[in-house]
Amino acid sequence: MVAGVAFLDLFYNGLFHPVAEYRRISEQDSPSNLTLFYGLIFVILISAMAPVVHTIWKAGDVSGLVFAVPYKAVTGLAIWLFMASIVSTLSYAFTGQARFRTLLALSALSTLPWVLMGPLSLLKIGLGDLGNFVGVAAGLILWLWSVFLFALSIGVTYRLSLEKVLIILVMPFLFSTVAFAWIVGFFVQVSKLLP
């Protein structure tokens, strides 16, 4: 199979037939390096597209894109790796399986709905005042779709029930709150030692 066709097949199936595509990838012991590379490309493209869409949306100055596009691409990659690491670690606690490569591949596919923000930003401009409402509603739908696909990627990767997937999704927020409380408590106790 030609690499370009595989890339487009993965893109199309990940966007419009995610359940079947996620299961197909998850059934492998580990996704191929090519699948991971395509996932990396998806994350870079979606992340780099964000400042372009924002500039179109706000009818802003394009000169800032020279720095914003690479910055967002690198930031997107870092967030993707960090999120996959956290979720993989939490999932390991439930299942005893790391499956980090599979989660990376599937979580990259979960970003694909955001590719539709480009055309939606152009639609927003063309619709005038109605475009603001349509744009915000469409953005919310894309966000929900992406979160659903991310949850699906966790569930399919680790073969978890919906309840366990929701627990894994909520745990980082709970741990962040606990960590913040511990840090505040530490500084409160240290401040009591000061004269």
Image: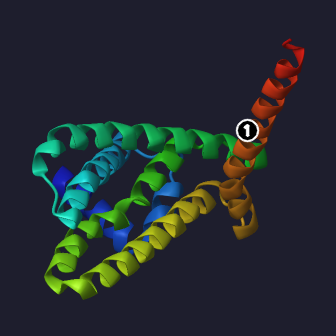
Residue with the most extreme front position: 195
Instruction: State which quarter of the image contains the C terminus.
Output: top right
Residue at 29% over, 37% down? 71
In-front residue for pair 175/42: 175
Q: Residue at x 22, y 78 (%)?
A: 124
Residue found at the far top of this picture:
195
Does dot 1 land on a helix, a strand or a loop?
Answer: helix
Q: Is residue 187 above or below residue 182?
A: above
Q: Is residue 19 visible?
A: no
Front residue of this view, candidates 23 and 112 = 112
Q: Is residue 138 left or right of residue 184?
A: left
Q: Nearer the viewer, residue 110 or 178?
A: 178
What is the quadrant of residue 85 in the picture? Answer: top right
- Label 1 crowd (10 A; few <14 / some 14-19 / many >=20): few
Q: Residue at x 46, y 72 (%)?
A: 145
Q: Considering the image in quadrants, where does the N terminus appear? A: bottom left
Residue 112 point in image, percent of width and height: 35, 62
Classify residue 182 by image quadrant: top right
Tag 1 residue = 180
Q: Nearer the viewer, residue 67 or 168?
A: 67
Give residue 62's position: percent from left, percent from top.
11, 50
Q: Amino acid at mark 1?
A: Phe
Q: Is residue 29 left or right of residue 129?
A: right
Give the residue drawn at x 41%, y 52%. 108
Please name the colour scheme applied to the rendered image.
Answer: rainbow
Q: Height in image: 13 above or below 124?
A: above
Q: Position of residue 7 (x, y in %)?
A: 25, 56
Give left or right: position of 19 versus 91. left
Q: How many callouts does the rendering have?
A: 1
Residue 181 visible at all: yes
